[in-house]
Image (cartoon, helix red, strand yellow):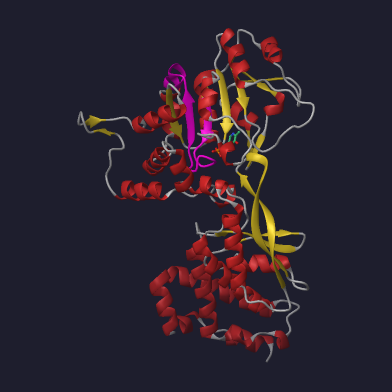
Amino acid sequence: MQKKELLKSIPAVNDFLAAPEAEEIIDEYSRDKFLQLLRKELDNIRSEILSSDFEVDNFNLNHLNVKYIINNIEKKLKIKSEAGLKKVINASGVIVHTNLGRSNLAAEALKKVLEIAENYSTLEFDLEKGERGYRYNKVKELLKDLTGAESAVVVNNNAAAVMLVLTALVQRKEVIIARGEMVEIGGSFRIPEVMENSGALLQEVGSTNRVYSADYVNDINENTGALIKVHTSNYRVQGFTHTVSSKELAETAHSHQLPLIEDLGSGILFDLSDYGLPYEPTVKEKIEAGIDVLTFSGDKLLGGPQAGIIAGKEQYISQIETHPLMRALRVDKMTLAALEETLKLYYDFEKAVKRIPTLNLITESSEVVKKRALKLESKINKKDAFKVELIKTAAKIGGGAYPLNKFDSYGLKLSLEQKSTEAFISELRKFETPVIARIQADKAIFDLKTVKDEEIELLADSINQVLAEVF
Ligand SMILES: *Cc1c(COP(=O)(O)O)cnc(C)c1O
């Protein structure tokens, strides 16, 4: 067959519309969407035939078959309609994985979200007075109890919290920050840029590795609005270093009638060193140290929904709450429902550790993880062509918390010998429930720290399916 004949053999749009298979697809996805993809498909076939390096012998004659083309269109429509948020199996071993949605919510929080999202609620209604109420009353009370702060309020995320605090308290004034704390958190969130966008003027002091309270004092002038301390979440300067403690810096700020703001990043409500983690001050201890305004995330170590929590002295919090930007950054009822229920669990730390998934994973013993890894291993269909090994891994918290801390964990290592590990891992991402694993020294690693017991069956099925296709 020659090019000309092939071109003539391309079916016409009407041939497709007459096919019963097309009718079903149109019913499901709409005629417009079907026709749009069909025209594209036909154009591609035409261009293929017309291209200068076209060889008739290499041409796939299916490309002239109505059913085949319709089937292709259906696949594409399906992929398109399924795009968007999806559950994944996180086999990365990173517990608070920013790209995979950070913290999973506790069952109590989920239940409340469902109830509040499905029904009218008391979001801004005072039942006693029968009139308008305040959205943040309950969460304020919970946060006051749990942190010892005079007041608290919540916004969309911690970046918003930092922005709002500076906008409300230090507008057109200078805020003094240690040079070593001008950090980039990731996802192009740079503390200095957020701060500058708030309208505050940044005044850097100290050197990258050392800063003293005298450095801050030297720079305080009549245009200074606040001092700020930023938790260098995702990195540590080690060796010849000096920083000023929150307590000392609070005293310095107060002796000059200035507030001290601290961006904690993660923020913990109780001491996790009881569970084998290095000591980090809790939010309560920071408040006791004299910090005037503290900010931290709701979905990092706290294990709740995405939110930025602002806690501190009443005089500053009320200024922040009444700032017009507050309205633009306020949280919705689902976030509030999830956060309130998560915070309620913290009244009993043991309960919090059991019920809040992020805390549960952080404190879980590696022997429990080993059991999951062994269970997965037992379900992999072994063959000589590849090797499966149970290995010790180092899981991480992620989300910028405890950057140097690794957890003893267990996982499986798959050595594919001649085959591409990259291709294997990418096939695993194509399932309806994609699997996110990592590559280390050209081996596929599945860290079981972040894989739930009830996901093992599906994970094994997916791995087996790809292995069967490859070998
Ligand atoms: C993570 C982090 C932020 C940003 O918090 P989001 O909740 O992601 O907006 C800000 N500051 C520090 C120190 C952080 O670790």
The answer to whether residue 61 is above or below residue 182 is below
Viewer-proximal residue among 378 and 42: 378
Residue 318 lies in the magenta-colored region: yes
Residue 193: percent from the left, percent from the top? 63, 31
Residue furthest bottom as drawn: 1
Q: Quadrant of residue 189?
A: top right
64 vs 132, nearest the viewer: 132
Number of numbered discs overlaid on the protein picture: 0
User: Looking at the figure, which quarter contains the C terminus?
Assistant: bottom right
Side of 341 relative to 259 (left or right): left
Find residue 249 and report its image quarter: top right
Residue 11 percent location from the top left of the image: 54, 84
Q: Which of the image's four quarters has the N terminus?
A: bottom right
Q: Is residue 370 visible?
A: yes
Q: Is residue 419 left or right of residue 158?
A: right
Q: Residue at x 57, y 38 (%)?
A: 274
Q: Quadrant of residue 197?
A: top right
> Within the displayed image, which quadrant is ligand 1 positioned in?
top right
Along the viewing direction, whichever of 302 and 256 lies nearer the viewer: 302
The picture places residue 261, in percent across and down from the top left corner, at 56, 22
Q: Please give the range of residues in magenta.
A: 294-319
**286 up-or-down from 236: above or below:** above
Q: Is residue 430 visible?
A: no
Magenta span has 305?
Answer: yes
Which residue is painted at 35% across and 47% down in the image?
112
Which residue is nearer to you in this view: 157 or 17?
157
Vertical arrangement, residue 438 with respect to residue 310, above or below? below
Q: Is residue 112 above or below residue 373?
A: above
Q: Position of residue 30 (x, y in %)?
A: 41, 69
